[in-house]
Image (cartoon, rainbow, N blue to C red):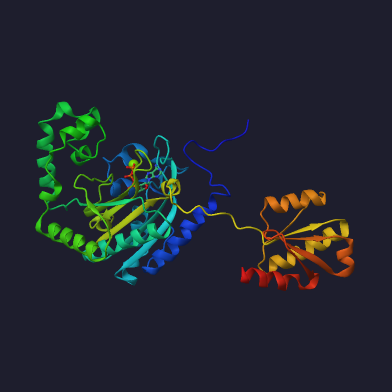
Amino acid sequence: MAINAIKGMNDILPGDVETWQFLEQKVREVFGTYGFSEIRTPAVEKTELFCRSIGEKTDIVEKEMYTFADKSENSLTLRPEGTAPVMRSLIQNRLHTLDPVNKLYYMGPMFRYERPQKGRYRQFHQIGAEVLGVENPMIDAQLLAMLHQYFCEIGIDAVQLQVNSLGCPECRPAYRQTLIAYLDARLESLCADCRRRYQTNPLRVLDCKASGCKEATAAAPSVLDHLCGGCEEHFTAVKKYLKVLDIPFEINARMVRGLDYYVRTTFELVTDQLGSQNAVAAGGRYDGLVESLGGPALPGIGFAIGVERLVLMKGAAKVQAARPDIFLAAMGEGAAEQAFVLMSELQRAGIRAEIDYQGKSLKSQMRRANKLAARYALVLGERELETGTADLKDMDQGSQQGVALDELVGLMGQLRSSA
Ligand code: ATP
Ligand code: MG
């Protein structure tokens, strides 16, 4: 019996991986322009890190974590998200003492025990960015401008930016109470899940897809009418700066996030291309998080993009694997060896060269050159070895030109740079 991968965990194969590499390359370019540096943290952390940051009563911590005991009975968890590990690292490595402002990005696999379906997997990948140490609402707008630019550069425009403010520890408790009282009077319309959680997590009810819950909360009090002075001012400024920067957005006062640490600005990039998995990216402010993890009182804001969902979207640049520059076909043993040496010289000069290793007929070698979509092909036989020259065939144009074998590397270099 062959062994298969774990359900909900996917291989990324040649042919697809080029698109992933392109998306990652664009992250380096665009995020780099905005002054972000990459940070890489381990895939596994102490379970406590996620319980304390994401929140015990969230779906992620209650149901979705891959938690296990190692051989010393330590409780470890495969990271379900990237923000908490980055904060742990910032505190542990005292990055804030080197620079009061830290702009960091990460890319990598995350793990959640969810029901696998289109756009929802058990190992998935996120591209995330975090800014630590800036309270100014300008950074909220700038982070969203960066996200917007990234999506433009990878060719995806079918997304809508929705923003909200979730208030802060000063104003949210009163809003929660108001919302609980409102829900209390409508319990019979709520789904079983929401009836269970409306006391502990009333905001989640606003986000519930069940039709009864949607109807019951249609006229629910809005968080935006309950912001304290500071949050109101912050949100007004964020909206102003988004307009100044020409970033299209909509207010969605019903947006809630599945992690407890968010305060003030929250946002999602949503699309109608992915069925119920409609969020491609999401994030927000988490001003108290670093302090709650034992670090300094640093404000923070960040987002995470779901890479699998990006790849599924129309318009996401489909990137082709690089074509070989040249295929060297050989007839006879001497020619095969010569082709092998030439290939190596070409590769050392940075030219993508291929040969046949199986001693196949010339016809089948040329078939392979076509299959690989080699740009040029060169046939080496006894005559070519004797004269030291050969015909270089342009596989796109169908034309030929003679070339001295000892000038092949130079010529290929020229052809490549003029292409
Ligand atoms: P959803 O509501 O779809 O479950 P979420 O709120 O749990 O998303 P976040 O924790 O905010 O998602 O993660 C940010 C992004 O990561 C999401 O917008 C999504 O694109 C992606 N993502 C989250 N969970 C998964 C998953 N299981 N498989 C694939 N992508 C995911
Ligand atoms: Mg989720």
Q: Is residue 65 left or right of residue 205?
A: right
Judge whether 256 appears above or below 244 on screen.
above
Residue 22 appears in the picture as rendered? yes
The percent coordinates of residue 96 (x first, y second) are 31, 67
Judge whether 162 appears above or below 342 on screen.
above
> For this rendering, which residue is in front, 71 or 342?
342
x 70%, y 58%: residue: 395
Q: Quadrant of the C terminus?
A: bottom right
Q: Quadrant of the N terminus?
A: top right
The quarter of the displayed image where residue 193 is located: top left
The quarter of the displayed image where residue 104 is located: bottom left
How many marks do you count on the picture?
Answer: 0
x 39%, y 37%: residue: 114
In the image, ligand 2 is in what quadrant?
top left
> For this rendering, which residue is in front, 409 or 404?
404
Judge whether 410 appears above or below 250 on screen.
below
> For this rendering, which residue is in front, 325 or 126?
325
The quarter of the displayed image where residue 91 is located: bottom left
x 13%, y 57%: residue: 232
Q: Is residue 250 left or right of residue 274?
A: left
The percent coordinates of residue 244 (x first, y second) are 23, 66
The percent coordinates of residue 416 (x first, y second) are 64, 68
Q: Is residue 326 left or right of residue 72?
A: right
The percent coordinates of residue 397 (x first, y second) are 68, 61
Residue 297 appears in the picture as rendered? no
x 21%, y 61%: residue: 238
